[in-house]
Amino acid sequence: MLKNLKIVTLVLAFFVSCQVSATDNKLSKKEKAEGWKLLFNGSNLSQWRNFKSETLNPKWKVQDGTMTLIEQGGGDILTKASYQNFELKLEWKISIAGNSGIFFLVDETGDAIYSHAPEIQILDNERHSDNKFDTHLSGALYDMMAPPVASHKPAGKWNQVIIRVEDSHLLVSQNGVVTVSIVVGSTSWNTLVANSKFANWQGFAKAGSGHIGLQDHGDQVWFKNIKIKEL
């Protein structure tokens, strides 16, 4: 009986942690004045569609004020609008042993959403098998730049990520800690690409503008407070 009670308590605690506050998925007066726009309003997914599709798979849902992939098969998704110079803010939470990602500068000329788009990793660093390399941990510029340990939170906790692209300068922070600062297309960038899995990927990170994308890696993931400002 005691064991079952503990399990129920843990399950309830998990679902309560999924809920959002009254201020989530809204813009403050200051944010509106600064030009921020919501990419998710907490009630519908009208600004998103699947990669190379005009529609959105129903496995991507609004649940308790969050945007979530409920199970594998929802497919990678992207914003209907594309962006060149922007600042993106969002919060994410990953399921136990889960994996996902945030893409930017997405085009649809490749076979997959990741064919040309850089990725900021989302991962349960403690349990997922893709934790063997520090460039694959949450907050990393995937397979290129490793994030500081101070930027990490365990699975089940909300994380805030800010991605800023301005005149090819990429600046990323996770939970208030800078994880990436580099100029896309620079010598340093090209060296990182050459030493990564993307070395021979034609067209990788060559788009001057593109969509924001979210990954279906087969695990449940939650998002909220997705906001963008064009620079």
Image: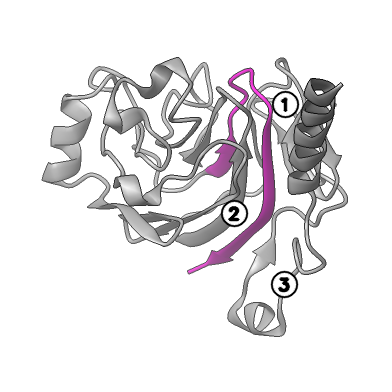
The magenta segment: 211-231
* Relative depth, front residue between 111 and 66: 66
Q: Position of residue 107 (x, y in %)?
A: 51, 34
What's the residue at 23%, 21% (across, down)? 199
Q: Position of residue 31 (x, y in %)?
A: 64, 77
- Of labels 2 and 1, earlier in sequence is 1
Q: Quadrant of the N terminus?
A: top right
**Residue placed under numbered mark 1 in the picture:** 53
Quadrant housing residue 119: top left
The amino acid on which the numbered mark 1 sits, given as a three-letter code, is: Ser
**Residue placed under numbered mark 3 in the picture:** 27
The amino acid on which the numbered mark 3 sits, given as a three-letter code, is: Leu
Q: Secondary structure at mark 2?
A: strand
The amino acid on which the numbered mark 2 sits, given as a three-letter code, is: Leu
Quadrant housing residue 71: top right
Q: Position of residue 74 (x, y in %)?
A: 73, 21
Q: Is residue 18 visible?
A: yes
**Is the residue 218 above or below the residue 168 in the image?**
above
Mark number for residue 33?
none
Residue occupying the far front of the picture: 2
**Is the residue 48 above or below the residue 168 in the image?**
above
